């Protein structure tokens, strides 16, 4: 999980400002919140965008820049100021530090220097515990075949996570051609992933949030493109940038991938912290789980983050048993979600998530507990209690694979 710092920069020199921007774009831990070409406008920009870091390039007018450090900190005392100059004049360095700058970097800027300065500032901001600031967790869901309930789980998991007020959650519909997350949430979004991807270089976090659709549950949605042709235009580079922006703004990004395992899907799975592989207890699904796990194994990091969820447990009497499924797959099942045809039909037809449609249903409770387990908040149940619970709900959390 990364702790993204939002940065606003000011540099009246176009060439060095462009250079700074390209160095910043290469850093994963920082999001360029705003850029400014005039010292006179910078304080207003900082007041409006409230970045974590203000970067002042001093070369155009060093004395004016020193005053600007003062002025910025007066209006935005929580903003950490970094400055850069091609001069190594000790007096200028001293004046900048006395005015409140946290770091003095020499031009031309090197990515390593900027990155270490940002790490130091990040540590200071989090009281010396790097990583203490809230990061973002990306949870990508995919299915062992079509129709196993991937979107149902993605949408309802997103709503369950959003119910915790300390979370901010966005659902990205990456089933680019046939995605239907918007239908599950009964929304007609104004903007889609292709609008965001096309305007990614002009978007800041405020604009991004305006481009997303917010559901009553608090869950934000970034839907798939409307036109099929637009779906094909989205590149992995654009996806990286969109995810960077979402990571800077949310505590959880849920991704509903397609079942095509396209380069875009694989890119999303690679970026994710958790990869949820949804299956049902039938032979074609389980065979695909085995095939998928074997190709995921090629990358160690990938293999470690895959979690298997069995959906629609209890659907048919002829279902393969969980024990047999575990044996076939060769690893533990992370979670089981019960079958509830009646509730799920209502949820789908009404476009209302489980939390609102059937808050007390066993399937809703199961997904709430899944959300807690993925957030590391699930209480581990003693074996006896787990058995009792199974008797009540027909479901229990499976032993975690890790
Ligand atoms: N636990 C469940 N109990 C009963 N029905 C379910 C359950 N989970 C999903 N369903 C139903 O299964 C159907 C398929 O679900 P969903 O659209 O979420 O699957 P999907 O894997 O996203 O499909 P696709 O491959 O088309 O994207 C829906 O009608 C949904 O209501
Ligand atoms: Mg789907």
Image (spheres, rainbow, N blue to C red):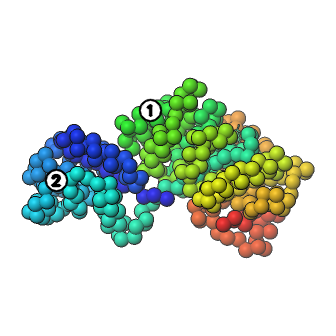
Above or below, 312 against 402 in this view is above
Q: Residues within 10 Å of mark 2 (few under 14, many from 20)?
A: few
Residue shown at 28% from the left, 44% from the top:
19
x, y (%) of residue 386? 76, 69
**Residue 335 image label:** none
x, y (%) of residue 101? 20, 60
Q: Quadrant of the C terminus?
A: bottom right
| Closer-to-camera residue (90/325) | 90
Above or below, 253 against 127 in this view is above
Above or below, 187 against 327 in this view is above
- Tell me: 78 left or right of 5: left
- Tell me: 9 left or right of 197: left
- Tell me: 61 left or right of 49: left
Foreground disc of the pair 1, 2: 2
Residue most extreme to the front? 298
Q: Is residue 357 visible?
A: no
**Residue 198 image label:** 1
| Closer-to-camera residue (352/116) | 116
| Closer-to-camera residue (176/292) | 292
Residue shown at 87% from the left, 51% from the top:
319
Residue shown at 54% from the left, 51% from the top:
271
Q: Is residue 341 visible?
A: yes
Asked which quadrant contains residue 133, the reply is bottom left
x, y (%) of residue 53? 29, 55
Asked which quadrant contains residue 381, the reply is bottom right
Q: Is mark 1 within 8 Å of ligand 2?
A: no
Q: Which residue is mark 2?
A: 86
- Secondary structure of the residue carrying numbered label 2: loop
Residue shown at 8% from the left, 52% from the top:
63
């Amino acid at each position: 999980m990364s702790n993204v710092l939002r940065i606003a920069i000011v540099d009246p020199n176009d060439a060095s400002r462009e250079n700074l921007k390209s160095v910043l774009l290469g850093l994963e831990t920082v999001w360029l919140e705003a850029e400014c070409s005039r010292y006179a406008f910078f304080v207003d920009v900082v007041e409006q965008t409230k970045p974590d870091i203000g970067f002042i390039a001093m070369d155009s007018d060093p004395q004016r820049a020193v005053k600007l450090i003062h002025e910025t900190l007066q209006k935005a005392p929580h903003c950490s100021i970094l400055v850069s100059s091609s001069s190594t004049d000790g007096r200028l360095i001293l004046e900048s530090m006395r005015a409140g700058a946290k770091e003095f970097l020499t031009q031309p800027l090197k990515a390593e220097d900027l990155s270490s300065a940002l790490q130091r500032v990040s540590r200071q901001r989090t009281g010396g515990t790097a990583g203490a600031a809230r990061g973002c967790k990306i949870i990508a869901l995919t299915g062992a075949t079509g129709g196993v309930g991937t979107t149902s789980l993605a949408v309802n998991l997103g709503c369950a996570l959003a119910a915790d007020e300390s979370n901010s959650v966005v659902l990205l519909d990456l089933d680019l051609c046939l995605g239907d997350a918007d239908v599950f949430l009964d929304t007609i979004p104004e903007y889609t992933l292709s609008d965001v991807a096309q305007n990614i270089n002009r978007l800041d976090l405020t604009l991004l949030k305006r481009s997303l659709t917010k559901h009553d549950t608090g869950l934000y949605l970034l839907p798939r493109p409307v036109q099929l042709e637009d779906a094909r235009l989205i590149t992995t580079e654009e996806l990286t940038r969109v995810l960077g922006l979402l990571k800077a703004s949310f505590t959880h990004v849920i991704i509903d991938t397609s079942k095509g395992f396209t380069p875009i899907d694989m890119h999303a799975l690679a970026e994710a912290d958790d990869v949820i592989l949804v299956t049902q207890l039938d032979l074609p699904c389980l065979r695909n789980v085995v095939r998928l796990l074997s190709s995921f194994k090629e990358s160690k990091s990938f293999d470690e983050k895959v979690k298997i969820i069995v959906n629609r447990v209890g659907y048919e009497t002829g279902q393969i048993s969980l024990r047999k499924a575990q044996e076939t797959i060769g690893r533990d099942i992370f979670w089981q979600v019960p079958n509830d045809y009646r509730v799920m039909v209502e949820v789908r037809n009404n476009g209302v998530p489980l939390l609102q449609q059937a808050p007390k249903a066993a399937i809703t409770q199961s997904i709430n507990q899944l959300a807690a387990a993925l957030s590391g908040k699930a209480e581990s149940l003693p074996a006896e209690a787990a058995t009792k619970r199974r008797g009540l709900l027909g479901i229990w959390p499976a032993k975690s694979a890790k």
